Amino acid sequence: MLPPPVRAAFFPEQAGPMRSFFHRGGKFQPLQIDDDERADLAVPDGLWVKCPQCGELIYSRELENNLMMCPKCDFHHRLSARQRIDMLAEADSFEEWDTDIRTGNPLGFAEPSGTYEARIAKTVARSGETESLVTGKLSIGGQPTAITIADFSFLGASMGSVFGEKLSRASERALTEGLPIVTVNASGGARMHEGLFSLMQMAKTISTLRLMGEAKLPHISLLTDPCYGGVSASYAMVADVIFSEPRALVGFAGPRVIESIIKQKLPDGFQTAEFLLQHGMIDGIISRPDLVTSLAQVLRHYRRSPGEALPALITTNGKIATPAASAIQTDNGVPT
Amino acid sequence: MSSVIGRVRRPGAPEPEMTEPGAPGELTAWDRVKLARHPDRPHTLDYIDELTNEFTQLHGDRTFGDDQALIGGLANFRGRTVMIIGHQKGRGTVENIQRNFGMARPEGYRKAERLMRHAEKFGMPIITFIDTPGAEPGIGSEERGQSTAIAESLLTMAGLQTPIVAVVIGEGGSGGALAIGVADRVLMLENAIYSVASPEASATILWKDVAKASDAAASMKITAQELLAYGLVDGIVAEVKPAHERPRDVMKAAGAVIERNLAELEAIVGKKNGRETLVRKRFEKFRAMGMWAIES
């Protein structure tokens, strides 16, 4: 669990002449991070991170203590899957699923720099994740739910066979256990190295999640920065409820692709969460401090009405439990 | 181009039918890309003219507009009414601008989805013709929810209780192609391609060099023969000669293969709980797609 937001002015040495030095711009631009590099950015101890929105230099620890939000402008920095789990899960409630599925190389794909297998092995070693999607179940604000989290630092959270298989298995298991599903989505698009196998994951994930819909189990999609291509054009955008983090970029085609085709500059705010909300594509925008309470609140709406048989819920200690009807009727967000 | 054509196998095959799975072609992947994009290759409306009667085109998404790049309507195909939906490329600059080079916008996918539901309502089978470089990338398309429109079409197709046969007749480009491709049978013309991104886009994404498009075409395994071997498509329509050279023969061949597949699907529907069986089989087919390993 991440500590609660701290905005106190610590690190006083930041505030003096040193600070204005960093703000001079021009010649000295520490840690200039472009989009590609940002994907690889884990925040090691004791480093300064420049906020992509306001340019503020933030001490990495301060960023971590503030839910990875810029203390100055609230820009939501990208989270790893593990950081997201820490943020959402009630203490120790996360149980990970399908950790043994490994990436294959269906096309025998090789880049000039090496094989696809080598690329994966390197990414696994660097990230500590086995693939770009982490799945499991956890409890958010008293609401047990299946969850999938895309990790953008793993090859841009590109959707290949393992991503599709893990997502499908998660929704099938949610179906079996009578759980809703929350998908935390980010992606640069399809995993190019797996060719048409990757494209077909769009059909596969949406087909499997459709079965949850048939069983009247809700799918809540949370869009995070950035979410493009095959993920946005499949299950992420047809959830029962779609939320986004503020300023997240979400779209079908990436801004650089569009710009290169139409040969004009894109309007300010194009493809941001706010743009999507304005155009009627999403249900709402939730900033991180409100995420747990908002997700828990929406999940409560889909609990079965009192008197109706409730789906069996498997608690975090593995025992099957049927929640009492009284547990549903809370008015303060806290289950009884 | 003619030297390329001379090397196409199966010259003068009598009654065209599906070729053998995995049979290696003599053309390179890039040769196929050029054939798939050939301006004289028959497009959706040509297939409709050749294979059906009484085509009644239906327009509009009832929300925003009518997309000329993705067309559809009712037609009589060999004695039954079917819903036909397909990308439509143009011939020449003027028509290609009108058709947006076969790149559909959200209203196109919403029209397609509307027509699919219409077909299901009246128990009509659906035939889709896939021929697009990809869904249109642009400001308007993003404003009107290109992702959402494609996703909703995929979701609808996954649950449609009516037979669907999809035929990739030229370029099967990315999500814009798959949006009308979640079918019980996915067929490809012998010289069609089907890819997660165009060879040019693939080369740019993978190697930041658009000039390597022909390498990307080979690496990405986009030909009908390769995709049939992977089980990602269900059959191939042989081209006795590339479709732009012998369009009527190739379209007739496609008609025969479509008819055979449609008849098989109609036989399933005719059985008890047949429509549910159809949807289940379609689900199982797409659910099984992917290649991964379990670590022991």
Image (cartoon, coloured by chain):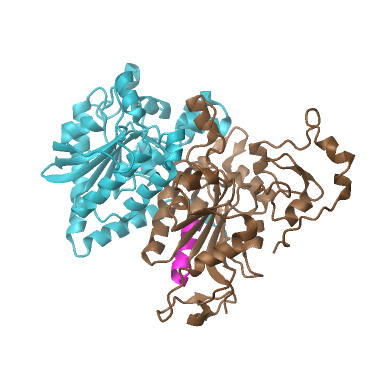
SS assignment for the magenta stretch, majority: helix
* Vertical side of A321 occupied by A258: above or below: above
> Quadrant of residue A30 in the image?
top right
* Vertical side of A312 occupied by A5: above or below: above
The x and y percentages for residue B13 are: 21, 31
Residue at the far top in the pictured view = B2
Q: How many marks?
A: 0
Question: Taking the image as drawn, is residue B257 in sight?
Answer: no
Q: Is residue B53 magenta?
A: no
* Vertical side of A84 occupied by B56: above or below: above
* Vertical side of A46 occupied by B97: above or below: above
Q: Colour of chain A?
A: brown
- Seen from the viewer's position, the closer of residues B128 and A336 is A336
The x and y percentages for residue A248 are: 58, 46
Q: Which quadrant, please, contains the C terminus of chain A? A: bottom right
> Quadrant of residue A34 in the image?
top right
- Left or right of B122 on screen, residue A255: right
Bounds of the magenta segment = A166-179
The x and y percentages for residue A326 are: 51, 82
Residue at 69% from the left image edge and 56% from the top image edge: A67
Q: Colour of chain B?
A: cyan
- Left or right of B64 on screen, residue A38: right
> Quadrant of residue A85 in the image?
bottom right
Residue at 59% from the left image edge and 65% from the top image edge: A293
- Seen from the viewer's position, the closer of residues A232 and A152 is A232
Residue at 36% from the left image edge and 28% from the top image edge: B100
